[in-house]
Amino acid sequence: MKESAKAPIIAGLIGLFVLALRKSSPNRPFQLPPPSRGKAMTTPPISPLARQVPGVRDPKLGRSRARAWGLLLHTTGGGVTDKAKKLGKTPIAVAIETYINSQNGANGYFWGGPGYVLEHDGTLHQLAPDNIVTAHAGGPHRDQYLDGTWLSKVSPSMATEWHRQWSVNRNPYSLFPSRSPNEDYIGVEMIPCGDGFGIPMRPGLRFTQAQFDTVIALGSEMGKRHIWPVGWQKTARLLGHEDVDPIERHDSKGGWDPGWLRASPYFDFDYVRSRIS
């Protein structure tokens, strides 16, 4: 059959197909299917150790991930305790309010903040299920980490401590498998001691014994729940914000978030790693 003869037949078949669609759905316009949200997480996304925070952003509005790869620890910074003291509030109330606002776009984008926040008495609060990606550790410096220029952006102490810990890794973005730490890590914000709130586990540290105990318990629970490999806690699956973004999280003496990559640490990762089961 000639091409000129085929054209009317093809056009007719297309017309019949469209007409059939319209007749089968007379009250609805023809639409493309909704975009996929990716594979569902096969492990439970809620920690039994945490209190579920009311009033958080609806997880149905978030972007889901199929797996959580590791755990990343933060300090909220002293601004939380300072504000709590000035307003006569508890630090956890200030932190939760801040992070719910971040989830709802206070920083110019949705789902800012961590999945969990940890108060001085060791109580753990979950603000987002583990299957929702939250913006807690990503930043604008990916290219600088990949091309090596990040070393000129951090203090000598930060560079030394980072390489001492991660000597087999090329750069902070080689610590995790995807393009962004937000994709792989569940974030936990810890409220530091200060402004009359909390007593450090020992002099020099900025977090309480109860906070260390909860981090250990959460690591043990999360490792089992998400089926992470034996010994995961001694690898880059467990680290701090300063490890993946030292440009933003350093001072003249090293890292400060949560503050373990420095000669006099604020947080004792060795203590945590040796006790996670």
Image (spheres, grey):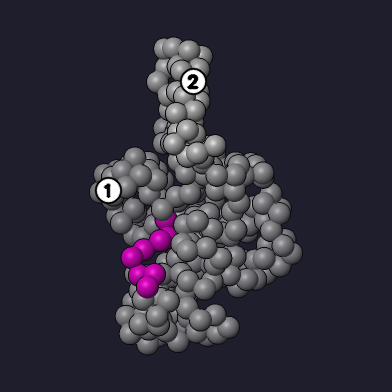
At numbered mark 1, what does the secondary structure look like: helix, strand or loop? loop
Residue 139 in magenta stretch = yes
Dominant SS of magenta comes to loop
Residue 34 in magenta stretch = no
* 170 or 241, nearer to the observer: 170
Residue farthest toward the left in the current orientation of the protein: 86
Q: Going 69% across and 49% down the picture, which residue do you hit? A: 225
Q: Going 36% across and 60% down the picture, which residue do you hit? A: 77
Q: Which residue type does callout 2 highlight? A: Leu
Residue wearing tag 2:
16
Q: Is residue 266 above or below residue 15?
A: below
> x, y (%) of residue 248?
34, 69
Q: Going 36% across and 79% down the picture, which residue do you hit? A: 150
> x, y (%) of residue 185?
53, 58
Quadrant of the rendering where the C terminus is positioned: bottom right
Which residue range is magenta in the image?
Answer: 136-143
Q: Where is residue 274, by image quadrant?
A: bottom right
> x, y (%) of residue 5?
47, 33
Sort mark 1 into few (<14), some (14-19) or many (20+) by Cα contacts within 10 Å.
Answer: few
At numbered mark 2, what does the secondary structure look like: helix, strand or loop? helix
* Residue 82 in view, yes or no: yes
Q: How many numbered marks does the figure carry? A: 2
Q: Is residue 192 above or below residue 99?
A: below
Q: Is residue 214 above or below residue 142?
A: above
Q: Where is residue 230, by image quadrant?
A: bottom right
First in sequence, mark 2 or 1: give its number: 2
The tag on residue 88 is none
Residue wearing tag 1:
108
Quadrant of the rendering where the N terminus is positioned: top right
> x, y (%) of residue 74?
45, 61
* Residue 199 in view, yes or no: no
Disc 2 from disc 1: Cα separation: 48 Å
